[in-house]
Amino acid sequence: MNTETVYPILAGKRALVVGVANEHSIAWGCALAFRKLGAEVILTYLNEKAYPHVAPLAADIDAQLLPLDVTQPGQLEALFAVLAEQGQLDIVVHSIAFAPKADLQGGLLDCSLDGFLQAMDVSCHSFVRMAKLAAPLMTQGGTLFAMSYHGANKVVPNYNVMGPVKAALEAACRYLAYELGPRAIRVHAMSPGPLKTRAASGLKDFDRLLNDAVARAPIGELVDIVDVGNTCAYLASPYAHRVTGSTVYVDSGLNIVA
């Protein structure tokens, strides 16, 4: 018998979660955690190819489902126009990243200008644009999340162009936390340990990275999407209303090991 007691500390809150591709997505772990704690959830899907994978998940948690491809002019603005008509927004999760395969799998020296700019636009600047549109809807304050990785601060072999891009994302989170703090909007860069997601599958020797994480992390276990989602739910709750601007590691302590 499950005797777990769940307190709906996010009841009455509305959470937009961007980046669910399938049930293995970090964004899905966030959506599950928010919904479990009482929040209303809005999910997005990238395109018609992605829709059949995301729609059943949205149905599972009674979530609204809307299209969003941040590379398409006007789509982000259209999404927030719909949300504005529906009322207040309290939580936003940005869990999207992209780099062309050739630029991702080659070293930084070989990264093309177009590839670098695409990676920066989708993985970093779209979060800034999202924050600008979300802030006016967070009339009672709110919480913004972006997904980073330890490769933003230390060299992780084969992470390549995404290292500098994620470093920019973490810096953007700090500056947004400073600018939005007076409006009671908190901003967090989340840094999960290695996870078996579709995005991670594009990294060379990723299985070796997973095995190394288990061997080196103090807790000796890989994290999963629920771990990340639960941490985000805590940070979005009243229990963390004085926490902002940090890079929050959810990695079994891997980041502290030399």
Image (spheres, rainbow, N blue to C red):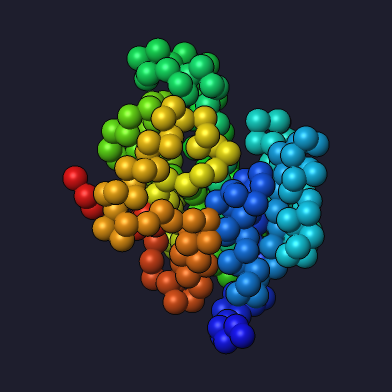
For residue 209, above or below residue 36: above
Q: Position of residue 9 (x, y in %)?
A: 57, 79
Residue 248 in sight here: no
For residue 191, above or below residue 183: above
Looking at the image, which is closer to me, 196 or 115?
Answer: 196
Q: Is residue 17 left or right of residue 249?
A: right
Looking at the image, which is closer to me, 253 or 27?
Answer: 253
Q: Position of residue 46 (x, y in %)?
A: 71, 39
Q: Position of residue 31 (x, y in %)?
A: 62, 60
Q: Position of residue 186 (x, y in %)?
A: 46, 61
Which residue: 47% across, 47% down?
195
Looking at the image, which is closer to me, 241 or 23?
Answer: 23
How many labels, in total?
Answer: 0
Q: Is residue 146 left or right of residue 43?
A: left
Quadrant containing the C terminus is top left
For residue 207, above or below residue 102: below
User: For the view shown, which residue lies furthest in the left direction?
Assistant: 258
Which residue: 66% across, 44% down?
21
Q: Quadrant of residue 209?
A: top left
Q: Is residue 213 left or right of residue 100?
A: left
Which residue: 36% across, 43% down?
211
Q: Quadrant of residue 140?
A: bottom right
Looking at the image, which is closer to me, 193 or 248?
Answer: 193
Residue 98 in sight here: yes
Q: Quadrant of residue 212?
A: top left
